Image: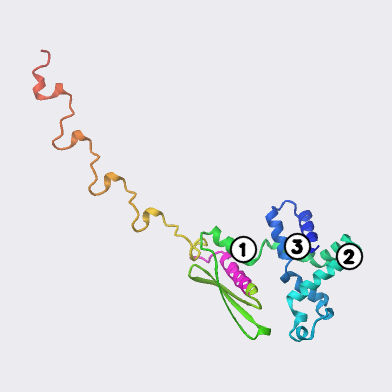
């Protein structure tokens, strides 16, 4: 129901956008990260019924529980009054978020945006290294993202996925900035293929004309070479003068 309402709204609001961009906008809105703050603002966490263990471990503030409960509210609106009340509730809570995503132009999650940026600039695909620690009820995760061998971003989160997203977002924000004066062009990302012409690379074949290379055959006309037969008309040779008019 949530995805239906958001997709319909996006299509009617921006029908000129490609299908892929519309799908990315929907994905950015229909996500735990987008829904949890909305649910928390509605006070959903205080109203949900939890077990003692979950409540004691901070379940009322857990993003996944808040997002799931928000979707349950949408389902209740639909069962109680049909599509129109459900649509009104969804857009009343999420329309500002939808508009913000459209204006930002930052479609898709951070990992996808970083991978697309690296591909456009000829760099290797991003590589993530994740560490974790802490007790079972309060695990933490730290991620680093590399392009080639160079660290380009890091981030932390309460899950591996969130840590990788945070690292990708940091890297994407840093790499998309225009280079400072005197800095190398943005296309020179870590791990990118060299833009140096092949002819200038060590071991590359020379692009000099073959005639200029050492040991190459001379391009001088054969008639001008030492020992070559004269190319002058035979009538002008000394031996031929006596035969003129014979």
The tag earlier along the polypeptide, 2 or 1, is: 2
Q: Is residue 93 visible?
A: yes
Q: Is residue 232 above or below residue 23?
A: above
* Placement of the N terminus among the 4 image quadrants: bottom right
- Quickly name the residue at label 1: 113
Residue 102 appearing in the image: no
Instruction: Give the image quarter of residue 143.
Output: bottom right
Q: Where residue 67 appears, x then y in whole percent?
A: 77, 72
Q: Magenta residues, as a range?
A: 163-182
Eyeballing the image, is 199 above or below 88? above
Look at mark 3 in the image and give the residue it sits on: 99
Is residue 59 or residue 167 the one in the foreground? 59
Q: Position of residue 191 (x, y in %)?
A: 48, 64
Dot 3: few (<14), some (14–19), or many (≥20) neighbours within 10 Å? few
Which element carries disc 3, helix, strand or loop? helix
Going from N to C along the chain, the mark reached first, 3 or 2, is 2
Circle on res. 79: 2
Q: Is residue 8 left or right of residue 205?
A: right
Q: Secondary structure at mark 1?
A: helix
Instruction: Determine the image quadrant of residue 159.
Output: bottom right
Identify the element where label 2 is drawn: helix
Spatial distance from mark 3 to mark 1, Cα to Cα?
A: 19 Å
The quarter of the image holding the C terminus is: top left
**181 left or right of 36?**
left
Q: Main secondary structure of the magenta part?
A: helix
The quarter of the picture where residue 69 lies is: bottom right
How much space separates mark 3 and mark 2, taking CA atoms? Answer: 27 Å
Q: Which residue is drawn at the image coordinates 63% and 67% (left, top)?
A: 110
Query: Does residue 236 appear left or right of residue 159 in this picture?
Result: left
Residue 179 counted in the magenta span: yes
Q: Are marks 3 and 2 in contact (CB under 8 Å)?
A: no
Mark 3 or 2, which is nearer the eye? 2
């Amino acid at each position: 129901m949530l995805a239906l309402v958001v997709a319909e709204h996006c299509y009617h609001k921006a029908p000129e956008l490609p299908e892929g961009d519309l799908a990315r906008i929907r994905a950015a809105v229909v996500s735990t990260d987008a829904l949890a703050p909305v649910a928390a603002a509605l006070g959903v966490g205080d109203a949900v019924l939890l077990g003692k263990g979950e409540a004691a471990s901070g379940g009322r503030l857990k993003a996944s529980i808040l997002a799931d409960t928000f979707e349950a509210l949408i389902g209740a609106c639909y069962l109680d009054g049909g599509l129109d009340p459900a649509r009104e509730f969804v857009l009343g809570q999420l329309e500002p978020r939808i508009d913000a995503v459209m204006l930002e132009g930052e479609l898709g999650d951070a990992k996808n945006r970083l991978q697309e940026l690296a591909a456009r600039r000829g760099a290797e695909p991003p590589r993530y290294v994740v560490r974790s620690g802490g007790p079972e009820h309060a695990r933490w995760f730290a991620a680093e993202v590399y392009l080639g061998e160079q660290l380009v971003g890091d981030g932390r989160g309460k899950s591996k996925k969130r840590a990788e997203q945070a690292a990708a977002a940091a890297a994407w924000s840093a790499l998309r900035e225009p280079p400072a004066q005197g800095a190398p062009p943005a296309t020179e990302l870590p791990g990118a293929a060299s833009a140096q012409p092949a002819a200038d690379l060590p071991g590359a074949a020379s692009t000099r004309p073959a005639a200029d290379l050492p040991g190459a055959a001379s391009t001088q006309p054969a008639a001008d070479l030492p020992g070559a037969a004269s190319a002058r008309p035979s009538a002008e040779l000394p031996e031929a003068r006596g035969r003129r008019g014979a």
